Amino acid sequence: MSEHIKRLAAPRVWPIARKKYPFAPKASPGPHGARESIPLLIVLRDILGVVNNKREAKKILNSRKIKVDGRVIRDVKFPIGFMDVISIADINKNYRAVYDVHGNMRIIEIPDDNAEWKLVKIENKKVVPGGKIQLNLHDGRNILLDENKYKTGDVLKIKLPTQEILAHYPMAEGSVALVTGGTHRGKVVHIKEYVVVRSSQDNIVRFEEGFEIPKRYVFVIGIGKPEITIPEVSAL
């Protein structure tokens, strides 16, 4: 299988020049799906401009100067997805991957203290041997708890890289959310009502902004106000 894709066919969320070069690297298998993530090489070379080519990217990664969510990464095609935190030791800068108002994924600079945590959505949960509750999160990680006190769809603020839970943001009235899919992707909205659908279809979330979408496209980012910064414009 090819290790590259045509830039014109690259996922819509990639904020890259489509016609400047013919090819772009594919992301390696990892915590995020191929259509919702960007290879680390694209982030370092095309978006941040901290390297000029793949060779330089491999060199800086092999020197263990790049961390994602507090963990050293050496794979040049590692998938960077929504809410991931990238730290670059050589320049003492930190970045977070978020969607902008046009639905493109942006890599925005964040303060050092913001790089110590990230927001993660509970995709599902289950009881594991021993009676503990396992939370399965949107970025592929899991957290084991003694108590079943969080609901599917809620968002947790966790410390990196220990995964200590710092705060809890429920999918409920009064919460602020970011739309992560569909025609409204990238919009910051305010939850008005969470509707449980008694069928195999997704539950529905209604917003003060006057529309509703399936629960799977809603990512809570705070209560009353966002915990993260959302870019206002797209950079291509």
Image (cartoon, rainbow, N blue to C red):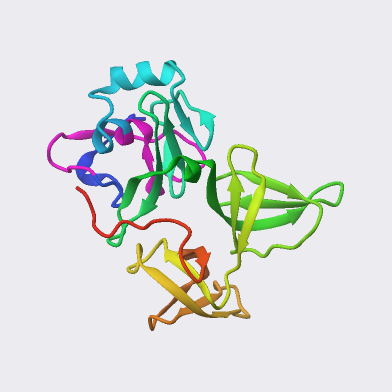
Q: How many marks?
A: 0
| Residue sitting nearer the eye, 94 or 192 | 94
Left or right: where does residue 4 sit relative to residue 150? left
The N terminus, quarter of image: top left
Left or right: where does residue 23 sit relative to residue 70? left
Left or right: where does residue 226 sit relative to residue 234? right
| Residue sitting nearer the eye, 18 or 80 | 80
Which residue corresponds to the image point at 57% horizontal and 81% vertical from the top-left?
Answer: 195
Location of residue 234 with respect to 188 vertically, above or below: above
Q: Position of residue 19 (x, y in %)?
A: 13, 41
Which residue corresponds to the image point at 68% horizontal and 52% vertical from the top-left?
Answer: 135
| Residue sitting nearer the eye, 7 or 219 | 219
Which residue corresponds to the image point at 37% horizontal and 19% vertical from the top-left?
Answer: 60
Q: From which residue to which does the magenta span run?
A: 16-43
In the displayed orientation, state which residue is furthest to the left. 20
Q: Position of residue 194 (x, y in %)?
A: 56, 78
Q: Position of residue 21 (x, y in %)?
A: 15, 34
In the displayed orientation, state which residue is furthest to the right. 130
Left or right: where does residue 235 sit relative to residue 144? left
| Residue sitting nearer the eye, 169 or 16 | 169
Location of residue 157 with respect to 204 vertically, above or below: above
Residue 171 on the magenta span: no
Q: Position of residue 199 (x, y in %)?
A: 61, 78
Residue 17 on the magenta span: yes
